[in-house]
Amino acid sequence: MIQFTAGWIGGPEIVIILVVVLLLFGGRKIPELAKGIGKGIREFRKAADDSGLADDLKDVKSEFDQVKKDVDKFNPKKAFTAEDPLSAKKK
């Protein structure tokens, strides 16, 4: 069963919505509508994949990683790490 955070839609409401859709569009139009929606979603995904957005995001991430490394070089807490002279040394 589908339940949203508001909790106002449940099983009976979904059945009523499906019956109304069936009455409005008829049994023959519903598969055509579903096919059209699926085709639109496929075209949208293809356009999003072809845009090169994923490659751009990888480039930005690598630049941020490089900046983080550069900043860590100048971070006094990480630049001078000294071992505790009283701790036991491992061989």
Image: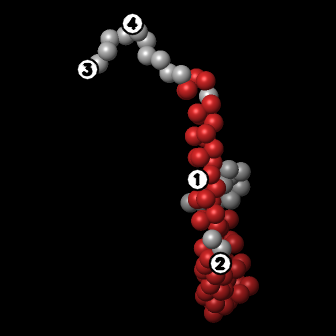
At label 3, which amino acid type do we have?
Answer: Lys
At label 1, which amino acid type do we have?
Answer: Ser
Q: Earlier in the sequence, mark 2 or mark 1?
A: 2
Q: CA distance from mark 4 to mark 3?
A: 15 Å
Instruction: Residue 73: give x, y in percent of width and height.
Output: 58, 33
Circle on res. 62 = 1
Instruction: Residue 70: give x, y in percent of width and height.
Output: 61, 39
Q: CA distance from mark 1 to mark 4?
A: 40 Å
At label 2, which amino acid type do we have?
Answer: Ala
- Left or right of 15: which side holds 80? left
Circle on res. 86 = 4
- Mark 2 or 1, closer to the camera: 1
Residue beneath the point at 65% across and 78% down = 47
Crowdedness of circle 2 by 10 Å Cα count: few (<14), some, many (20+)? Answer: few
Q: Earlier in the sequence, mark 1 or mark 3?
A: 1
Residue ID for mark 2: 47
What is the quadrant of the C terminus in the image?
top left
Q: Secondary structure at mark 4?
A: loop
Looking at this rendering, what residue extends furthest in the bottom direction?
Answer: 28
Residue beneath the point at 63% across and 93% down = 28
Residue ID for mark 3: 91
Q: Secondary structure at mark 1?
A: helix
